[in-house]
Amino acid sequence: MARLNYPNRSLRQWPFRPTRWLLLGVGAWLNACAPTAPVHTHRAADDSEYYVQAVPDDIINRRILPDPIGGLGHSNDPQLRVTDMRLTAQYTVLYLTFDHTAAGFGNNAGTEISIDPKAKLLAPDGKSTFAFVKAEGIPLSPESRKVEANDKVKFVLYFERLTPGIEEFALYEGEDTSTLSFWRVTDMHIENPEN
């Protein structure tokens, strides 16, 4: 049997020192006090949600989801985005953002915006149109609102409700003139099944 030679006697006596036991006891106590309950997350209500990635409840309960990149649909004006849309009993409601920070490099001038009351929603067949009803956050032409450089304006447009079964549509405000630029947003989609 070989005898271990310790250069320092304190290493051989380590387990018997009271301070070492005190440190081990404190470490065990801290480990026992650590929380063991799982963090609250969204739980699946039924089997259809089983494979859906769990997300916190506050994200699920938000009224308007974060803007998709480029908005919903395709706008002729890169500063205009449709951020949300809703169907109510009476209206088709579009939530829009005019982002003058997206005007491009070197464009520090302000601009004026308004909505033409002749704006309408068009069905893909071109025969069905849904008239403009009212707006919130943006004036009707010929009145206008000044938008300074680097400003964002959020507004809401109300149109007649889409006929059930029409799920693809476009916003048509008018054709551009030499002095005015009109908004057109195509390829918008909303769930609107036939009854």
Image (cartoon, rainbow, N blue to C red):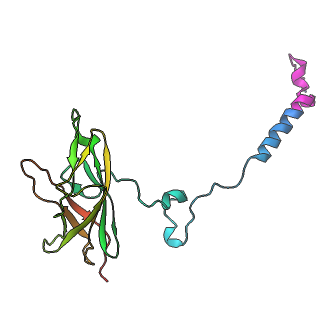
Picture layout, residue 56 above or below residue 111: below
Q: Is residue 128 left or right of residue 40?
A: left
User: Residue, x 74% and y 46% (percent of image)?
Assistant: 34
Q: Nearer the viewer, residue 179 or 20?
A: 179
Residue 154, horizontal then vertical, whole percent: 33, 52
User: Residue, x 79% and y 41% (percent of image)?
Assistant: 30
Residue 104 quadrant: top left
Quadrant that contains the N terminus: top right
Residue 25, horizontal then vertical, whole percent: 86, 38
Question: Furthest-bottom residue in view?
Answer: 195
User: Residue, x 50% and y 64% (percent of image)?
Assistant: 51
Question: Furthest-top residue in view?
Answer: 7
Residue 31, horizontal then vertical, whole percent: 77, 43
Q: Does residue 2 show up? A: no
Range of the magenta residues? Answer: 3-20
Q: Nearer the viewer, residue 93 or 26?
A: 93
Question: Furthest-front residue in view?
Answer: 143
Question: Furthest-left residue in view?
Answer: 178
User: Residue, x 47% and y 59% (percent of image)?
Assistant: 62
Quadrant that contains the C terminus: bottom left
